[in-house]
């Protein structure tokens, strides 16, 4: 059994405006943190175990002896939270364990099955085409993030949930606050209250109206709330989670993916010529870019040995997906971008019972967005000289604030 040393982790990932946004961690950071389980000090002053190897992360995320509940004493936080209520909101099933987590998740599983996502692919294509029209009309030059990467997943998730897209500026601003590690606690608290209030009103309106619309929130209101199985506040919590996760991760993946492909024009041209490579390309992009760069936090509820290191009950753990996705024991030449790589073992969506429920939708949106962009804009290129575009360095979900393009 190994004995780990203690390393400072003042901000994770560190804000470094000189770093290439396509590289989750630079060589020095990888040297310090990649490898065996390591004891680190978090930005809050607490300590936790850092898990970075692919096999160790998989073991951790599937082991029942680790909890995702933020409300547990000792849970490893990367920033102070504004209130205890923020830790365990009703319906926030990704922060739940056991039967309660499984019960809420089962209500959504069928919605995001591959066969159901395939059924809505025409909607995704229509949304992508509309956004590409907007991109064309806005430039050149035009901001690909504002006119394409962000609107596509936002419009799709709004349609699926039954949330008016006309309100996108309101919920996008609040979503960004909630996942910004640098946001002041009072603003986080205010924005979460405002977002929950907005969705509470929407859900109550659907419940009161007996809404027969075939969107997800209407169906859950009709089938679960009306029957007394689900409380309104629980449905609101599920809506908050789905609305944020449904556009933030995919939007940032689209923006970063386009930046990467524009740096590899031959790969971009290949996508246009061979659309059959798109599924393989998407997995490699997810592995290579790993937008959830802060990792996943867990709390040990029993003594568990991970990677030869004993982690005792009550100790916190951070699983760094970005490093696991560049583990040379699993991926040959892990720092290279290879669109023909069989990268299905990546952990970009997590692993185990808390693995992202919306991954079939995210894959479909990313695949269709990139294929259609390459088809309609074969001459796409950066509109400004090579340099670092503005990025969201303190966000839990890393991405670009802007990507100016021309064609």
Image (cartoon, rainbow, N blue to C red):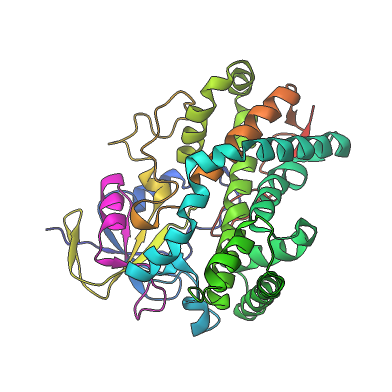
Residue 54 falls left or right of residue 23: left
Classify residue 259 by image quadrant: top right
Q: Nearer the viewer, residue 299 or 125?
A: 125
Q: Nearer the viewer, residue 76 or 359?
A: 359
Residue occupying the far top of the picture = 273
Classify residue 125 by image quadrant: top right
Quadrant where the image shows the N terminus: bottom left
Residue 170 falls left or right of residue 121: right
Residue 247 falls left or right of residue 135: left
Image mark count: 0
Q: Nearer the viewer, residue 36 or 188?
A: 188
Q: Residue at x 28, y 59 (%)?
A: 38
The answer to whether residue 22 is seen in the rendering is no
Confirm whether the magenta stretch covers residue 125: no
Q: Residue at x 28, y 55 (%)?
A: 62
Q: Is residue 45 above or below residue 368?
A: below
- Residue stretch rendered in magenta on the structure: 49-75
Q: Is residue 19 above or below residue 235?
A: above
Quadrant where the image shows the C terminus: top right
Image location (x, y in percent) of residue 88: 46, 77
Residue occupying the far left of the picture = 1
Image location (x, y in percent) of residue 155: 71, 50
The answer to whether residue 3 is seen in the rendering is yes
Residue occupying the far bottom of the picture = 84
Q: Is residue 309 above or below residue 140?
A: below
Q: Residue at x 65, y 72 (%)?
A: 207
Confirm whether the magenta stretch covers residue 61: yes
Q: Residue at x 69, y 65 (%)?
A: 211
Image location (x, y in percent) of residue 78: 46, 69
Image location (x, y in percent) of residue 141: 84, 36
Q: Nearer the viewer, residue 18 or 51?
A: 51
């Amino acid at each position: 059994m190994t004995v780990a040393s203690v390393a400072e982790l003042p901000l994770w990932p560190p804000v470094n405006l000189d770093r290439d946004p396509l590289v989750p961690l630079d060589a020095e950071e990888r040297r310090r943190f990649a490898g065996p389980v390591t004891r680190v000090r978090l930005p809050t002053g607490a300590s936790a175990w850092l898990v970075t190897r692919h096999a160790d992360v998989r073991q951790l995320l599937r082991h029942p002896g680790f909890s995702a509940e933020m409300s547990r004493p000792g849970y490893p936080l990367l920033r102070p939270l504004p209130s205890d209520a923020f830790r365990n909101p009703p319906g926030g099933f990704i922060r739940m364990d056991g039967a309660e987590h499984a019960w809420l998740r089962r209500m959504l599983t069928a919605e995001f099955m591959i066969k159901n996502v395939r059924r809505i692919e025409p909607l995704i294509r229509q949304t992508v085409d509309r956004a590409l029209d907007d991109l064309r009309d806005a430039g050149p030059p035009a901001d690909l993030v504002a006119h394409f990467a962000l609107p596509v997943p936002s419009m799709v998730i709004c349609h699926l949930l039954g949330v008016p897209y006309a309100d996108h500026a309101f919920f996008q601003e609040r979503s960004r606050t909630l996942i910004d590690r640098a946001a002041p606690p009072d603003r986080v608290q205010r924005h979460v209250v405002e977002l929950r209030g907005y969705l509470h009103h929407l859900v109550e309106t659907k419940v009161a109206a007996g809404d027969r619309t075939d969107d997800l929130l209407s169906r859950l209101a009709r089938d679960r709330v009306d029957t007394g199985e689900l409380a309104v506040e629980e449905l609101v919590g599920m809506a908050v989670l789905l609305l944020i996760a449904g556009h933030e991760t995919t939007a940032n993946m689209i923006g970063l993916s386009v930046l990467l492909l524009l740096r590899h024009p031959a790969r971009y041209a290949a996508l246009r010529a061979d659309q059959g490579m798109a599924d393989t390309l998407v997995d490699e992009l997810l592995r290579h870019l790993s937008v959830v760069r802060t990792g996943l936090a867990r709390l040990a509820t029993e003594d568990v040995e991970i990677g030869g290191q004993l982690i005792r009950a009550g100790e916190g753990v951070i699983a760094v997906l970005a490093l696991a996705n560049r583990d040379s024991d699993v991926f040959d030449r892990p720092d290279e971008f290879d669109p023909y790589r069989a990268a299905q073992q990546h952990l970009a969506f997590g692993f185990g019972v808390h693995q992202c429920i919306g991954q079939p939708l995210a894959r479909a949106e990313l695949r269709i967005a990139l294929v259609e962009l390459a088809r309609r804009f074969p001459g796409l290129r950066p509109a400004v000289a090579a340099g670092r575009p503005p990025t969201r360095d303190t966000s839990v979900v890393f991405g670009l604030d802007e990507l100016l393009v021309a064609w």
